Image (cartoon, grey):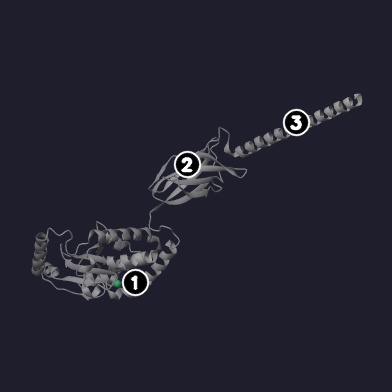
Amino acid sequence: MAVDAQKDRQLVTMVRSEKKVILNLNSEVLKRLLLVIFALAIAVPFCTVKAGELSEEETAFVDERNRRFQMCLDVLPKDVDDALRALSEEGLSIEFDCPEGSKKKECRITVKAEWGLSWDQIPEEYQDGDGYCEWVYGFYQTKEHVKVMGCQVKISLNVEELNSTEQRTGVRGEIHTLAVLYHELLHVQLPVDAMKTDEWRQALCNCQDPGLPGSGTDGHDQIDPFQEDYVERLWDKVQYEEDPWTVKQKLGMSVYDGTTGELLAGIALDVYSEEGKSVHSVVTDTNGYAEVTLPEGEYHVKAKIGILGFPVEMYASPTIILDKPHSLRIYIIAMFVPVKFLPTIIYCTLAALIGTGLYIAVKKATVRKRRSRSIDRLQDREAMRG
Ligand SMILES: [Zn+2]
């Protein structure tokens, strides 16, 4: 049993994105290698960035592109959920039972991925590219009849090159970076897909190395069309957006009559930024509802009601902090008069005013005419006396 386990630990395999490199190390060599790495890490404590680690700028670049990638998961032609899980804190774990008659009863696989290597640390033959993915895996045995496979994946982006392309070409360059990121994540996803097939599992259950289909150049037949499709879909999604990579939230607004509680259609809503700049205008639909999508931030909403073609400001909402989808209820109060009667009331008031004005004007004109007639008569009489 112990001998079996020893043999299992002897195989450590390394697969690189574009080519497969298999290294056979026995555990003694591995231990020494780890000691040397440990000693080096202690010996170079004054370097701000240790060899192989990402610099602060590289980390910031990679983090921001990952955030953008996560924002646009809806356009992926093929999802990479397992790859993203492998990149998470917990990593990805897969367990399955072996079919009857296999050498082992059960298999456990762990996949832990990270943005691990700075570009100058990746093998020279890959440095012309924009992205790089490297799998290192080994087989272990913790219990009898349980096969364990541990995988470490390191993904890298050519930050300098991608950054300069983005500077030169704007959104197209930004999409290119995300496409490279997607390409590398597919080099993680495809082998995980393979791990879910019966054939692959059968091989592992029988203590054979089933390999990592799709982790190297063999994956490009599948990856390239997905990548092209992704670029097109992403371009369609973001090309008309002013600031495509800011996080946006939905703000739903229902407008009620403050007196009757009825929902109000056709109410214009103006959304203002914290600085008082109008950022969006929208009109409530027949259900008294309107929706806008805005970047995270602070806003206030003013509701306006149109009367005889003149919008009258009726209500200003309190400030909203929009950091998640928000739904707002706006009650318009029109001095205890139902808002729906407001246009009629204002129309009647105006009609009454105009009517009174006309009556007064006509009356004044008649008085003036009578007076001028009397004056004419007086003048006639005086002329006769003269
Ligand atoms: Zn590739």
Quarter of the rendering occupied by the N terminus? bottom left
Residue matched to label 2: 329
Q: Earlier in the sequence, mark 1 or mark 3?
A: 1
The foreground one among 377 and 5 is 377
For image coordinates 84% across by 27% down, the residue present is 374
For image coordinates 26% across by 66% down, the residue present is 156
For image coordinates 9% across by 64% down, the residue present is 35
What label sits on residue 223 in the rendered view? 1
Q: Earlier in the sequence, mark 3 or mark 2?
A: 2
Task: Give the mark toward the camera: 1 or 3.
Answer: 3
Mark 3: give few (<14), some (14-19) or many (20+) Cα within 10 Å. few
Residue furthest top as drawn: 385
Q: Quadrant of residue 346?
A: top right
The foreground one among 356 and 203 is 356
Quarter of the rendering occupied by the C terminus? top right
Residue matched to label 3: 364
